[in-house]
Image: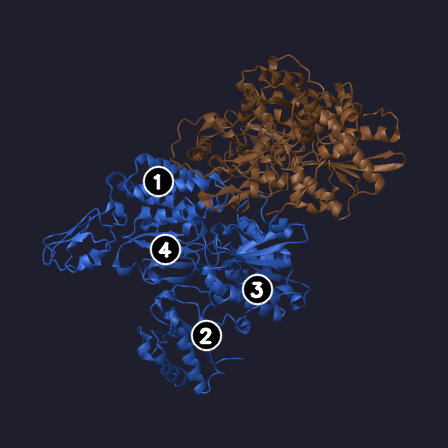
Amino acid sequence: MLYRNHILISSHTADAAAIKERFERELAARKLSGAVKVISSPDLIDDSEETLVVVYPEGTFYRGVKADDVPHIVEEHLIKGRFVKELLRCEYDDSTVPSLDRLDFFRKQQRLVLRRCGSIDPEDINDYIRTDGYQALAKVLTAMTPAEVIAEVKKAGLRGRGGAGFLTGLKWEFCAREPEKVKYLICNADEGDPGAFMDRSLLEGDPHSIIEGMTIAAYAIGASQGYIYIRAEYPLAVRRLKNAIAQAEEYGLLGENIFGSGFSFKLLIKEGAGAFVCGEETALMASIEGNRGMPRPRPPFPAQKGLWGKPTNINNVETYSNVPLILLKGADFYSSIGTEKSKGTKVFALAGRIKNTGLVEVPMGITLREIIEDIGGGVQDNRKFKAVQIGGPSGGCLPRSHLDLPVDYDSLSQAGAIMGSGGLVVMDETTCIVDVAKFFLKFTTAESCGKCVPCREGTTRMLEILEAITRGQATLHDLEVLERLARVCKNTALCGLGQTAPNPVLSTLRYFREEYEEHILQHKCRAGVCSDLIQYQIVAERCVGCQACVRVCPTGAIRGEKKAPHKIEVLDCIKCGACMEKCRFDAIIRS
Amino acid sequence: MSQVTLTIDGKEVTVEAGTTVLEAARKAAIDIPVLCYHPELRPEGACRICVVEIEGARNLPASCVTPVAPGMVVRTNTPAVREARRTNLELLLANHPQDCFTCERNNNCELQALARDLGIKKVEVKGVRRDLPLDKSGFSLVRDPNKCVLCGRCVRVCSEVQGVSVLDYADRGFEAMVYPPLKRPLDQVACVNCGQCATVCPVGAITERSDVDRVWEALADDKNHVVIQVAPAVRVSIGEELGMPPGSITTGKLVAALRRLGFHKVFDTDFTADLTIMEEGHELLERLENGGVLPMFTSCSPGWIKFIEHYHPDMLAHLSSCKSPQQMFGALAKTYYASKAGYSARDIFVVSIMPCTAKKFEAARPEMNSSGVADVDVVLTTRELGKMIREAGINFAALPEEAFDEPLGISTGAGVIFGASGGVAEAALRTIYEVVTGEELKELDFTAVRGLKGIKEAAVTLKGRTIRIAVTHGLKNADNLLKKIKAGEADYDFVEIMCCPGGCIGGGGQPIPVDREIREKRMSAIYAVDRGMELRKSHLNPAVQELYKTFLEKPLGSKSHELLHTHYQERSRV
């Protein structure tokens, strides 16, 4: 069925369901149910305060919508064709349509992979088909040989979006070349970087694009069985994938003899139990096989001996999502986007001390500055930009001097970071760089599988040294040991997790060494984060004795008579900073 | 196989394709240091000690898992390599108890040797000494997780060689550790006590339970008449434990050493091995004649017995009801010998020297008390005996050759070959042939059942009936064979199964290290002993003949059943 309008409700708030219901009720009352489709969608912008409503096809967006606004929107926009000005909340003049694309957040983005997320109903295969879905598969199965598919993907220059950036077409070719009859295809949907949700958004918002991409890949390498390895912590994604698989099977787009081409492909979902290391391909395969998720040495590579010992191709969610686009629009179109060696777009999860957070999709080669300042709107509260962490726990921290670095695989890697799966955390001057390194290392230390020595023991020892530094208990010799451990772990760890675990340490040491030395030599944390190195004091002259700080102090560390200057007992103070926040007279200072 | 030429440390080396860099370097006389690598196990690549520089590689690959490639340029001794090896070793040492003085593996420890070889002067990283409880639950093995370096050799030998898989990793990261299932103690899981884990452990994280002090105490107690039996395989391995080359035949020196340690009588398990042939051989003949359950499985190997009880309990009826030679010995020592020598069963303290850790468990089985008390009091491994000999200051290599005591020290070559895989089958054939045909067997060597091949087969035709024999060793091989038999894909009359690779010469209580070459040397020593024996057929053993005449009456007689035969029980897998 064709709809006149689509209404998309994007919200974290509790009343999203109520708003959706209200829309449906109001539309029904005006006999518009068949003409307008209402969709709840994953969040377009990571904006937890407000409900966003977008009306397509024009893309008009309304912010801060309440259930009671709904009749007005229906009446004005859908029936009378006028914008509800008071809900637009953005500058607008009558000459242009206040569409989503006009937001700074979207203007520099190029949403190819995410193009359907939020604009189609992910639970309805017809919505996918209506937006050119499964056309690439039809073309591939009816008019192309596997070798032609591989050649096209190679020509497009698509590189793996999971982290390492290996050429996807080449990977497929290795697997296709194996003479073995039984082959497997795996989608790595074990997204585990803290704060990263690119894959989740795709899985929830456009599950069919992954299924289509996988089916094309399966045809190219000659696999008839595929697995989607997805973390069980993504229940909605699992549900939508299952639904999508069932619908695709029902439509004959998955399963036996697809499009009557003789090609058959079956997809199974394997839910992972949340171990970060299971995102490593050999550990992932071990997990599917029912074994402990521990990496094994390569070679043999999965393309030679993978799942159950058979040739196996593994790509991540975003990689597969790119595939239908390449086959549909052609390698020339695709390779026109991006840089010479990094083609297409990349989805990042923009987070940290930045004005606009959320998922962004940008063409390769865009600078960090454009992402942070233009799309992200710059650092919050007009603070000073300090660093950007790219690639999650395996990535690196880049300083201000690297803001004009083009975002592509090779530039990032040269600078000591990685593309990774796409985490991008912006930090301002209130962030302690040693603390950041500690945060990421804590994560990898906890997620190490424990198999190889440098990762199991080395990350633990590195973390201990970082902890000593943030407590002001380390020496410059410890810093040398830290560097040696980081170097050896990077050089000798068995799998990607261990090889990249020291990256946050190495990159911060490379760009922010003086901050480490300050902690060690001067026992100073310039960001005021390392609680062992800071002290809160009351400036007696400014204190009016209002007792506000006494009431908020969780440990009763502040003493003093009413209307007389107070004092903080150093031994009782846990340095939470609550008193400083509470004080209206700036009488409490941190040193 | 195609050949690959590469350069290692400036020298060209040509090896077969598929060879690892580590193996190729060894060919070029460069021994890259290793820890988790074991030549007989699938390489794990876990310790990262064997890292090397390879031109074009972005990091330092582990040579044990990196296959050679044409034109590859490898450097095994560069500053980066040395730093990496030392650092990774330091990381291990930082957590290690470093209680070498009191460790079972003092002076035979690969971690110790690596620290020496890699020139570790100081451990610069601060580590955390764990204080995990020791697992002393079993009769055979002790696990000390504090010493574990997580090389995974035990995990691999348990699954790859023994098919038991009772050890695996649990927990993650720094907390990762090797445990039995559900972190249960060893005596509550389906461990067969074979001790192969202890023989491959590079450190002292898995060792046999030491019973040396109990033996010293028994020897010091005047009330005891302490007799000792020595298993066939020990005479070709104790020398190795005491610094002699592998495969040294030291039967006479061993007897001399045991006398000097103070044992009142030095007997030979070979005697009851001969007796086993009489009982088991007749049991087989009876099964063949009366339509009994076939194939009949041998029952000398206690690891194998526990394995079938846990993993194939539906096949228990195939097991010979004969006790192992060790237990036959214990039962006879405390009855037949006791009455001959004028002792009661309680006066006699029986010590066994076994190549085996599972024998400790076997001796502790409650049913092994035909004499009214425990038939065997203490079982020591070859390694433990070595410790006693060293402690006593006995210069083993310089000892004279002495002979076993009579009567339980008289044996034949058929008894001694029990120590090698195929030996029981061969000994049985030598006797059965003559019993059935009444003719003298001229060609004694059944070479088809000898050697280290996983499954060996032979067929012998006796009076028109062909007896089909299979011989296997290592429980993974045994498991495969049993599955084939169950599936009807294999059909035999008699199957010899030994728990450990190579049979008892490769037992879990034997000197460390062991590899294929060492096993071969021990094995050929066993056959050399056999060749040197005056008598080589069990039924010709005069002491055995005397035993039947004066005590047991006949094979499978009522006395035999009482003393020499046993029963088995189903055990759960979890």
Q: How many marks?
A: 4
Q: Earlier in the sequence, mark 3 or mark 4?
A: 3
* Amino acid under disc 3: Glu
Query: On the rendered structure, is B269 left or right of B93?
Result: right
Mark yes or no: residue A493 visible: yes
Colour-to-chain, brown? B
Crowding at label 2, few (<14), some or many (≥20) Cα neighbours within 10 Å? Answer: many
Q: Chain of mark 1?
A: A
| Residue at 64 percent of width and 30 percent of height | B375
Q: Amino acid at mark 1?
A: Ile
Residue linked to disc 1: A465
Tell me which chain appears blue. Answer: A
- Label drawn at residue A425: 4
Gap in angstroms between the C-alphas marked 3 and 4: 31 Å
Q: Is residue A59 above or below residue A230?
A: below
Nearer mark to the viewer, of 1 and 3: 1
Q: Amino acid at mark 2?
A: Ile
Q: Do discs 3 and 4 share a chain?
A: yes
Label 4 crowd bin: few (<14), some (14–19), many (20+), radius 10 Å: many
Secondary structure beneath label 1: helix
Q: Residues within 10 Å of mark 3 (few under 14, many from 20)?
A: many
Please provide percent x and percent y for residue A79.
41, 85
Residue drawn where x is 52% and y is 66% of the image: A239
Q: Quadrant of residue A81?
A: bottom left
Residue holding disc 3: A212
Instruction: Using the image, name the chain to which the residue with label 3 belongs.
Output: A
Callout 4: SS: strand
Q: Is residue B44 left or right of residue A92?
A: right
Please tell me in which quadrant of the rendered image residue B258 appears.
top right
Tell whether label 2 touches label 3 (CB within 8 Å).
Answer: no
**Which residue position is annotated with label 2?**
A39
